[in-house]
Image (spheres, helix red, strand yellow):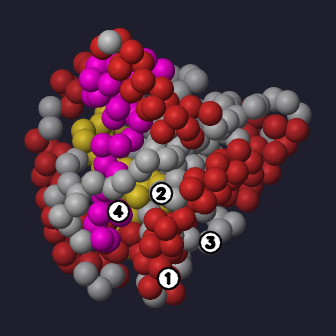
Amino acid sequence: MINILSRFKTSLMFARYFGRNFRPDTFFAAKIYFYLAKSLNYAEYLNRKRLSDSFAIQNKKIKHNEGYYIGNFKRMKDGKKVMGAINYFRRKHKLINWKEIEKKSKKPFLLKKEVKLSKQLQTICIPLVKIISKYIGCYPVFLRAELWYSPNKKNFTGRSQNWHIDGEDTKQIKVFIPLEKVDKFSGPLNFIDASNSYNIYSNLKKNKIIKTRNTKLSDDIVKSFVPEKFIKKMTMDLGEYALLDTCRCYHFGSRKDKKPRKLIFLHFTSPFAENFPTIFRKPHLEKSNEEERLLYGYVGQDYKVLKSEKIKRWDFKFY
Ligand SMILES: [Fe+2]
């Protein structure tokens, strides 16, 4: 009986995370899935669209054909408050035992420490969410926040140190906030804007060199499509921040370099990223206001979290 029940739960979960389990990682399939998930959850979409429309047009900072934006918190209205929150995380970053994290890490070139939801984190998110909403076209979902430390000591092939596009969504924004100046010697993120990235992807796909967005590419392949000057380096001073749509822009980071890199990392997706349930979905945080519920209410419903934490409880063997 327990076995039947467990199988039923597994099948239910498999269907709930339809996008994660069935959607191929191509621009086309991501778009089709987005429209499907949007139609299945249209009331939620309308709520999110209404919020996004209420934000001032000045927040439309990320151009569609570029897919990135580099801004400065100090020029914002609540810049001082945001800088205070960044300093709070700078102190936290110093107290972390990165050597211990390195021992357990699957990515020794990029060490991460999860940041839980807090007032300081929300202070940083508030101005960014408006910009991200205007780009994605609806109020986004906060997926996670982390403190990052890239030692930049060694290169690994076939990993995120090689050119690739992320596969989670049609559009998403990863936010990079320096805790120390990131210059060209700090293993900065390298990226190519959205329209040039799409040209590279289409050419490679047409010539049957790649099947998915996330296929890792060598520098030589990328440079055969775009001149060196098209490759941008995400260097930033303290107070600056970078927003990058990693689902539309080719990128790599944390390569071997002279200095380490220290960042706050935030990840926002559309509500219909493959990470979240396609059907029977509901944001948590019932007691918060609607905006907070829609923004933070899917934390912990990411398939990656289910995989690492709940897999035993759900007996979820598909991942
Ligand atoms: Fe990536």
Say which label, 2 or 3, has the lower sequence index: 3
Residue 135 shows up from this direction: no
- Taking 44 as reference, is 12 above or below it? above
- Residue receiving disc 2: 271
Sequence-wise first label, 3 or 1: 1
67 is higher (above) or lower (below) than 184: below
Few, some or many C-alpha atoms within 10 Å of disc 3 (few <14, some 14-19, many ≥20)? few
Q: Which residue is mark 3?
A: 63
Amino acid beneath label 3 = Lys
Q: Which mark sits nearer the N-terminus, 1 or 4?
A: 1
Pinpoint residue 74: horizontal percent, then vertical percent: 30, 77
3 and 1 marks in contact (CB < 8 Å): no
Part of the protein shown in magenta: 290-319
What count of labels does the image hold? Answer: 4
Label 4 secondary element: helix
Q: Amino acid at mark 1?
A: Asp
- Three-letter amino acid code at the position of disc 4: Leu
Where disc 2 sits, the SS reads loop
Give the residue type that dot 2 points to: Pro
User: Please, which residue is most extreme toward the right here?
Assistant: 207
**Residue 290, position as x, y percentages in the image:** 30, 71
Location of mark 4 (residue):
295
- Looking at the rendered image, the disc whose residue lies closer to the viewer, 2 or 3, is 2
Secondary structure under tag 1 reads: helix
Q: CA distance from mark 3 to mark 1?
A: 17 Å
According to the picture, the residue beneath numbered tag 1 turns out to be 53
